[in-house]
């Protein structure tokens, strides 16, 4: 492949990405198109370097190939350390084990691969090929998720909004915990910025009452905002929802009942913003999602959880692709 062909392919994928992004930025496939653009642009750059200095190009390729295993090793250690931190700070729940399990999984796969090479038994070699293929596919999707979630979070909407929806995340009794307070503080910033520009959007606090909560979440959220200077008459309380889907659909119905041609902005934590945007699109909300800051130690596990949720939301597509990858891998050992 010459540089021209690589850059043409990159340009093709960029045009596909741009068209899809302009139509609706709340699509996972936008991330796939963007990463394909970057991959082929990178290949083109390597060929450009090779055209001027083939030795430099070879060293560049070797450096990239060398960085990959190093990055995997660093990632595994980081995930294990982060997983231990999560257990200490957040407790022993399955969702808090994700980064630890991912780190141990990477280490386990490396040990397994080395053992298979030494043993040389064909069935184990076939299993290794299947795992490499499936994990490569999942890793590619994860990179697409990370890259596009970052891009999505950096794109700001300049459109006027009629409502600012704050998604609930649970109370401690009747108290708003730091994770939820971060969302409410971000929503308050958006509201105050709109007021300074002569607008007056309504805030929608969304969340029902959980089994260990003293009152509906939306009511505690509204009280938090009122205590910090937001007029009570500017707050709508959606107090029936128990899931993100219900947060969005019940809030949609509430907003549409007041203003059928509404526009809204949805506020959640930064790790949850992209998946919330995908859900908002399915729920047919006319609005984008913005994120609020999250504690650094919490972000890796939460990000893995978000990706897994997106992955399993398309079981037939991803399961079918994994089966095809497995069949192709096994056929090489038959």
Image (tube, helix red, strand yellow):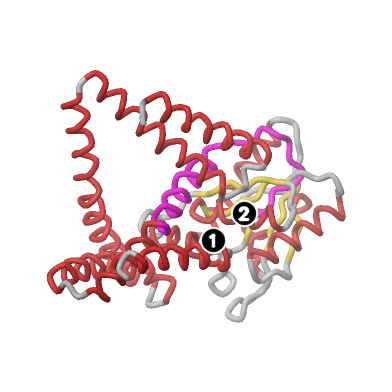
Q: Position of residue 157 (x, y in %)?
A: 64, 36
Instruction: Check the image and report above or below for 210 versus 224.
Output: below
- Residue that appears at 70% across and 59% down: 248
Determine which of the numbered discs, if any, sits on residue 61 in the image.
none
At 72% from the left and 58% from the top, the residue drawn is 283
Q: Earlier in the sequence, mark 2 or mark 1?
A: 2
Which residue is painted at 30% across and 70% down in the image? 126
Q: Which residue is mark 1?
A: 310
User: For residue 114, what is the image quadrant?
Assistant: bottom left
Farthest top residue in view: 52
Query: Taking 158 as reference, is 255 above or below it?
Result: below
Which range is magenta? 137-166
Camera sees residue 224: yes
Q: Looking at the rendering, which quadrant does residue 50 occupy?
A: top left
Image quadrant where one finds the N terminus? top left
The location of residue 256, given as percent across then percent down, is: 84, 53
The quarter in which the C terminus is drawn is bottom left
Q: Main secondary structure of the magenta part?
A: helix
At mark 1, the secondary structure is helix
> Residue 309, image x and y in percent?
52, 65
Is 37 on the left or on the right of 164, as rendered? left
Asked whether the viewer can see residue 218, the reply is no
Answer above or below: position of 199 versus 252.
above
The residue carrying pointer 2 sits among few (fewer than 14), some (14 to 19) or many (20 or more) residues within 10 Å by Cα, namely: some
Disc 2 + disc 1, Cβ < 8 Å: yes
Q: CA distance from mark 2 to mark 1?
A: 9 Å
Residue 278: assigned label:
2
Q: Residues within 10 Å of mark 1 (few under 14, many from 20)?
A: some
- Residue 160 on the magenta span: yes
Say what secondary structure mark 2 lies in: helix
């Amino acid at each position: 492949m010459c540089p021209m062909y690589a850059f043409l392919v990159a340009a093709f994928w960029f045009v596909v990405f741009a068209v899809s992004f302009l139509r609706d930025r709340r699509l996972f496939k936008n991330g796939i198109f963007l990463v394909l653009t970057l991959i082929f642009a990178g290949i083109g750059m390597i060929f450009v370097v090779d055209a001027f200095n083939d030795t430099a190009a070879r060293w560049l390729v070797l450096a990239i190939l060398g960085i990959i295993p190093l990055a995997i090793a660093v990632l595994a250690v980081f995930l294990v350390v982060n997983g231990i931190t999560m257990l200490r700070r957040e407790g022993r729940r399955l969702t808090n084990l994700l980064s630890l399990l991912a780190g141990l999984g990477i280490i386990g796969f490396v040990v397994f691969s080395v053992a298979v090479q030494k043993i040389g038994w064909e069935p184990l070699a076939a299993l290794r090929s299947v795992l490499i293929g499936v994990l490569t596919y999942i890793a590619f999707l994860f990179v697409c998720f990370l890259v596009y979630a970052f891009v999505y979070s950096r794109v700001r909407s300049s459109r006027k909004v009629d409502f600012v929806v704050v998604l609930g995340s649970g109370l401690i009794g009747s108290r708003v915990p730091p994770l939820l307070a971060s969302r409410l503080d971000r929503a308050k910033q958006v509201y105050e910025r709109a007021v300074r520009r002569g607008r007056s959007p309504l805030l929608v606090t969304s969340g029902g009452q959980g089994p260990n909560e003293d009152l509906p979440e939306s009511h505690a959220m509204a009280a938090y905002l009122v205590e910090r200077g937001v007029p009570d008459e500017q707050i709508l309380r959606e107090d029936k929802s128990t899931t993100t889907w219900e947060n969005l659909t019940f809030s949609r119905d509430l907003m549409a009942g007041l203003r059928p041609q509404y526009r809204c902005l949805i506020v959640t934590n930064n790790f949850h913003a992209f998946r919330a945007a995908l859900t908002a699109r399915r729920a047919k909300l006319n609005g984008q999602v913005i994120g609020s800051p999250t504690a650094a130690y919490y972000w890796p596990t939460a990000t893995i959880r978000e990706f897994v949720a997106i992955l399993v939301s398309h079981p037939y597509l991803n399961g079918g692709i994994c089966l095809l990858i497995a069949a192709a891998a096994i056929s090489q050992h038959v």
